[in-house]
Amino acid sequence: MTQAKYTKNRGSGVPQRALIGKGTWMDKVAYQVIEREKKLGRNLDLVRVESGLGASGIPHIGNLSDTIRAYGIQMALEVQGVESEHVAYIDDMDGLRKVPQGLPQGINLEQYIAHPVSRIPDPFGCHRNYGDHMGALLRDGMDRVGIKYSYQSASENYKRGIFVPYMRTILSRSEEIGKKIKEITGQEKYEEALPYFPICKNCGRVYTTQAMSFERSTDSIHYRCVGTTLRGKFSEGCGYEGDTKLTSGEGKLSWKVEFATRWAALDIRYEAYGKELTTSVKVNDWVSDLILGFPHPYHIKYELFLDKAGKKFSKSEGALLTPQTWFRYANGSSLVLLMFKRIVGTRAISIDDIPKYMDELDWLEDVYFGRINVEPKEKAQRLKGLYEYVTFMNPVSRQPHIPYRLLADLARLAPENKSVEYVVRRLNATGYNVSESSPVIKERVQLARNWGIDTLGGHETEGKTSPVLTEKTRAAIAELATRIQSASGADEIQSLIFEEAKLNGIQPSEFFRDLYRILLSQERGPKLGPYIYDVGVARVAKKLLSAVSE
RNA sequence: GGGCCUGUAGCUCAGCCAGGUAGAGCAGUCGGCUCUUAACCGACGGGUCAUGGGUUCGAAUCCCACCAGGCCCGCCA
């Protein structure tokens, strides 16, 4: 990898290095995972990769990045001939640290602070508990994207007892671990407390307890509910003191040692992490390697996605961009593209970016099928590889390709029930040649229409903006309303508008502007004749008449 | 105190992670199409790729330094 200098072909303009896998960052990561495993002398029969899912609030687009990318690594491993599996692991034993915004007000979640999210009632009332609800949203996103994963939950794993042998080791060597945590993070807490949080038998909270001693022969842990500081806010302990069994599933490990345990128990060879977890991962790597004797998984660190408040959405829905929102406007592949095209760097993402990704997907498809030529060849090859991954190794051609914004612009103003016909007709009038029955068109029109209406406004957004009309104009509009009803086509309607304007001594441009205001609440718009014809003359006539009778 | 990200055309950004002649969208100018407008189509983009060094035949891309902005950790999980 570092010998590039010597393998280049001097002067010819193109590096001669062989491509690893398909030439994307995922291939490089997979390659490094494999090389590392070989060096460690571990068996490569099945290389398991893991992604973590948080269940503390409504999942946004960034929460899906880890899991989608982990699936990408699985594919890249398989491209290189190594069998792989992807575990999507939900941390539903974690306590609720803060009540997130945007949840139903039905129950007061404040009272559940520090309770495991899998033991808090579902505020939406439709799942077994809070964590389950969030997990379902996450899975809905993953399923709609189409990635493969084996879903595991912390609460079930603790209940099943699969961590018990590892926990015994950790708790027996807690002194050593406590010192190391101090050394790496400066945190002194675990020099005293064991890195395990029993769920308080009395108050049901996890983080408020402090485990004081562990009896290996009986697997029992003695603890007291002393309280804790979460997000800068102190939660008083209830004072309960008692014992719990390691095997009961009534407690969880501290993050400082929990990942390591999971890795060892599930035989995880690769897991990425967000930069905020850097120090925790460092501790866990050490624990995994030296306490549990399981060489820690290969990691990459990624930057987080930022939410750029969606302009039109910020008021009503908050700045949250959820997978469900994405799918209202775009297909799964576009989201995968966003995750796969690049791993480095912070990205601010909002619904305004959706058209770009949809169009880039079409472009990538054209590159893949050779309809667009990209130089140098190596670059083209890597882009083709990216397309293969984005389509989950099943590249298909989904024609025709219409720029998303154009579709959105046309579709948002299309009549309600005939949007596809309307858009197709407009498209064909401007030089495209598309069919109404194309499933791609149907899907795209629907998505782009949603996007157009939500971000730019649709024709149903009229309201208080009815124009002030002169008497002349009123008369002209009323007459027009009557006359268009017997018009035989779009051209005739268009002519009628001009005629009415001239007949009543109105500037056509003014007349048009008033009509646009009435019909679309804007001063400009699509060519009116065909538009009115498509919407339906009766409907338009009614609208016009009601506007002049106000 | 430690770590990371960003800085590219008037604006928003892509390209950087595997170096090979500076890109897109929007805005702008001109033209085309349309019996309005928008859309659409065509033409027009000399920006020291923040700055200074280095590596290289070749650097926006790699390395070092530096400036500016932002984020994370330094509570807890």
Image (spheres, coloured by chain):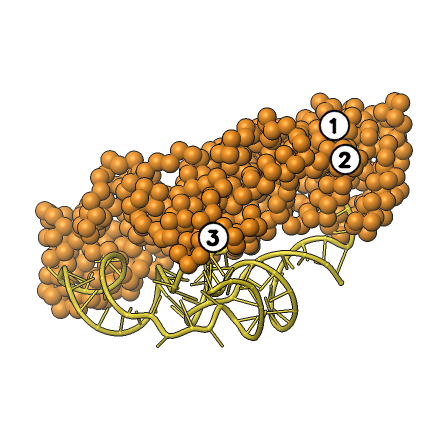
Q: CA distance from mark 1 to mark 3?
A: 50 Å
Q: Earlier in the sequence, mark 2 or mark 1?
A: 1
Against A43, residue A26 (above or below) is below
On the rendered structure, is A503 left or right of A411?
left
Mark 3 burial class by Cα count in 10 Å: few <14, some 14-19, many 20+: some
Callout in the foreground (2, 1)? 1
Callout in the foreground (1, 3)? 3
Q: What residue is shown with label 2?
A: A253
Q: What residue is shown with label 3?
A: A8
Q: CA distance from mark 3 to mark 2?
A: 50 Å
Q: Colour of chain A?
A: orange
On the rendered structure, is A210 left or right of A506?
right
Q: Residue at x 85, y 37 (%)?
A: A174
Residue A413: x and y, percent? 29, 50
- At label 3, which amino acid type do we have? Lys
Q: Are marks 3 and 2 in contact (CB under 8 Å)?
A: no
Chain letter, yellow: B
Q: Earlier in the sequence, mark 3 or mark 2?
A: 3
- At label 2, which amino acid type do we have? Leu
Chain of the residue displaying label 2? A
